Amino acid sequence: SIILICLGSLLPDIDHPNSKISKQNPLRYITKLILRHRGLLHSLFTPIFLYLTLSLINTELASLIFIGYTSHLLIDSFTKRGLRPLYPLFNFKIKGNTRTNSIVETFLFLLILLIILIK
């Protein structure tokens, strides 16, 4: 379960050239051309679409990927760059004061992970 949640939490950054998952993506150059970072993959529509698609195969798999994906989006909503949760329909942004890769962001990640593990 934890592995699938972690995989789900990496997926929103598959379009970022320096992310761990992007470096493993054989289509990273095509992905970079089509998607811009913190665009569609950082929208709530993507994890919902993934959930609905994967639930046709396995609902538990879909749920775990969804939890990881949305936890990534939740943490990104606290960063200075923020995210646009309803992109491309609406362009409003949710953002906070936390720097990406900061101690605060790491703490938020660990807190969310702890909450997931307790449940």
Image: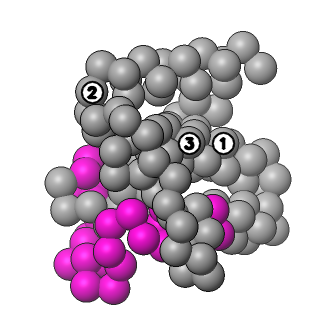
Q: Are marks 2 and 1 in contact (CB under 8 Å)?
A: no
Viewer-proximal residue, 16 or 79?
79
Question: In terms of sequence position, does the residue under pointer 2 or pointer 1 come before the other?
Answer: 1
Viewer-proximal residue, 3 or 32?
32
Amino acid under label 3? Leu
Tag 3 residue: 74
Secondary structure at badge 2 equals: loop
Can residue 8 be seen here? The reply is no
Q: Is residue 13 magenta?
A: no
Q: CA distance from mark 2 to mark 1?
A: 22 Å
Residue at figure coordinates x 19%, y 62% from the top left? 17
Secondary structure at badge 3 equals: helix
Tell me the tag on residue 102: 2
Q: Is residue 25 magenta?
A: yes
Compared with 13, 103 (above or below) is above
Residue count near mark 2 (Cα–Cα under 10 Å), binned few <14, some 14–19, many ≥20: few
In percent of width and height, residue 79 lies at 38, 41
Q: Is residue 16 left or right of residue 42?
A: left
Tell me the tag on residue 67: 1
Q: CA distance from mark 1 to mark 3?
A: 10 Å
